[in-house]
Image (spheres, coloured by chain):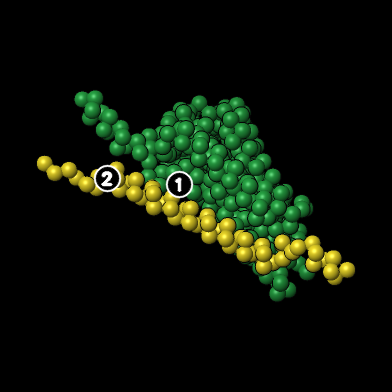
Amino acid sequence: MSLKVTHELHQRRFGRNVGLALVLTGFIAVVFGLTVAKVTSGDFEPPRATQETE
Amino acid sequence: MSDATINTTSQTGEAGFGDYFALLKPRVMTLVVFTAMVGLLAAPAPVHPMIGFAAILFIAIGGGASGALNMWWDADIDRVMKRTKGRPIPAGKVQESEALGLGLTLSVMSVVMLVLATNLVAGAMLAFTIFFYVVIYSMWLKRSTPQNIVIGGAAGAFPPVIGWLAATGSMSVEPWLMFALVFMWTPPHFWALALFMRSDYDDAGLPMLTVTHGRPATRRHIFVYTALLAALALGTAFTTIGGPVYLAVSVVLNVMFLLGAWRIWGRDEAAAELDNYAVERRFFRLSLFYLALHFAAILMEAVLKPYGLGGWA
């Protein structure tokens, strides 16, 4: 009798792993997007820049 | 025999991704996302789209985390009630400890990320919201007072305030008007549900108004709260977040809502049972549109403002 390779349980685990991978990828994308947004909108201007204008 | 039992348990006991997602109460999350978004967009401060998106996302995750913690704490009563029997923990798909772990992890993560994305005040308000829903409502009030829904409704009313804070970083009256709208809307919404989900709350031993004060008192309470809500909703039309569009929408919705509440008050259990609680069910469905359309109208006023069309000015 052959062993069934992909049991329903394996499919569920695979789905869970894919879901987690997508969530983590999404999280990285959000953090990256936030970083770009913060840097380009001038939230992290170095204090030196204000001294120079004075 | 025991092998077969173990095998069956392992097959039904292992959760899929969707089961973990269901712990976050996705349907409640849609309300959180929408009201938080309206709070953020109605605020008089421009927000970078990416920061706005991240803020809504982390508010939603924080709301979901409190949902998971609520399911962890309420697993015993969820097993008894028809409405909640299918949730991942009572269904045996997710362990209670897993829900606790997921809830705590996502709570911390969402608060920290909201602080980093926006500001400390918004993050602190999100942390307080999670605390309020899990500790004040779920652990304390839900099982001890028939006013559980009234005070617990505050937990669901915080998202527009957090959205506003994420945009402005400071407090003002307008987000609290949105808070009050959700807060006053929650009791009639849930009491209507309690009327037609008849034995659920009795079976779970929850001190819902229907159980402690009886159904006629609940019907009266629904009307009184609806009348107060109508006054608040219509009054909001004349504030800075309101305007003609909001007023038109609000007048129509409040006339319908008051009429529904009046009908609920005017009939008894015998009449309700005859038509299988049709009036109460209709009122409950209307309540979903009521809140969504009020917030949509606030959003509309905010969107029209830059073109000189929104508000009364």
Q: Residues within 10 Å of mark 1 (few under 14, many from 20)?
A: some
In the image, residue B146 lies at what x, y percent? 60, 30
Which residue, given by chain and number where applicable, does mark 1 sit on? B21
Answer yes or no: is residue B71 visible.
Answer: no
In the image, residue B265 lies at what x, y percent? 58, 41
**Chain identity for the colour green used in the image:** B
Mark 2 and mark 1, same subunit? no
In the image, residue A43 lies at what x, y percent? 72, 62
**Quadrant in which the N terminus of chain B appears:** top left
In the image, B70 versus B35, the foreground residue is B70
Q: In the displayed image of the protein, which residue is found farthest to the left?
A: A1
In the image, residue A28 lies at what x, y percent? 53, 57
Which residue, given by chain and number where applicable, does mark 2 sit on? A8
Residue shown at 58%/46% (left/top)? B109
Identify the colour of chain A in the image: yellow
Q: In the displayed image of the protein, which residue is found farthest to the right?
A: A54
SS at mark 1 in the image: helix
Question: Disc 1 marks which amino acid?
Answer: Phe
Number of the front mark, 2 or 1: 2
Residue shown at 62%/50% (left/top)? B113
- As measured in the structure, the alpha-carbon distance from the residue carrying label 2 to the one carrying label 1 is 19 Å
Question: Disc 2 marks which amino acid?
Answer: Glu
In the image, B214 versus A16, the foreground residue is A16
- Identify the disc placed on residue B47: none
SS at mark 2 in the image: helix
Disc 2 to disc 1: CB gap under 8 Å: no
Residue shown at 80%/64% (left/top)? A48
Instruction: Output the chain of dot 1.
Output: B
